[in-house]
Amino acid sequence: MALRPLSQSVPAVTAQVCQRKYVMLGRLLTHWPEIVGEELAAKTQPTKLRYRKKRPGQTEKSTAILEIAATPSDSTLLHYRKDLILERINQIFGESWVADIRFIAASGRHGPSPRRMKAGIPTPAQTETLREMLEKIDDPAIYERLEKLGTAILQEKSP
């Protein structure tokens, strides 16, 4: 069995259960080490995309604000690199749809703490579908990250 790029797996996991923004967040997670560098990628995490929709009569297109979970010291480093991060993100996606970055507090020295989610619980059918989508992924680390991403998305979507 040949290895597949993570960029192919993330959209497959997120496409069935999420809106477009989650696919884009998955792509951000896939390219995160390229965007901020390996060291900061291990300590920070993109957590949310907030879309500002185009209003009727406006000439501007819809844009997004990216929220990044980071400790205060890492937030400071990222703040100084904000323009470079935005440039790299928009190079990956081919357009300027991420207009701004906001930093949210993350506790601990080993990366961001999990965000509080709605109290939704994925159904057994949703969990099984997620496992089926991930069954061909051989790398345990990639499998675990994709499973966590898929479960988090399912939790947010569940009533």
Image (cartoon, rainbow, N blue to C red):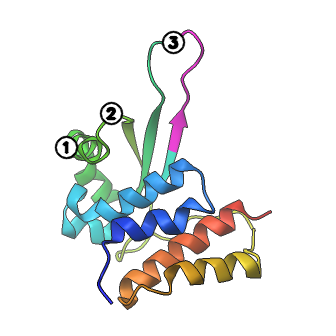
What residue would you read off at disc 3? 58
Callout 3: few (<14), some (14-19), or many (20+) C-alpha neighbours within 10 Å? few
Residue placed most toward the observer, 137 or 144: 137
Percent coordinates x, y for residue 158 in the rendering: 75, 65
Callout 1: few (<14), some (14-19), or many (20+) C-alpha neighbours within 10 Å? some
Relative to 115, is 107 on the left or the right?
Answer: left
Instruction: Report the residue at 52% width, 77% height from top.
Output: 148
* Contact flag, marks 3 and 1 (Cβ < 8 Å): no
- Secondary element under disc 3, as helix, strand or loop, is loop
Mark 2 residue type: Ser
Work out which quarter of the rendered image holds the N terminus and state it. Answer: bottom left
Does the segment drawn in magenta span residue 53? yes
Q: What whole-number distance in Å separates the C-alpha atoms at marks 1 and 2?
A: 13 Å
Mark 1 residue type: Leu
Question: Tag on residue 84?
Answer: 1
Question: Tag on residue 96?
Answer: 2
Magenta stretch, main secondary structure, is loop
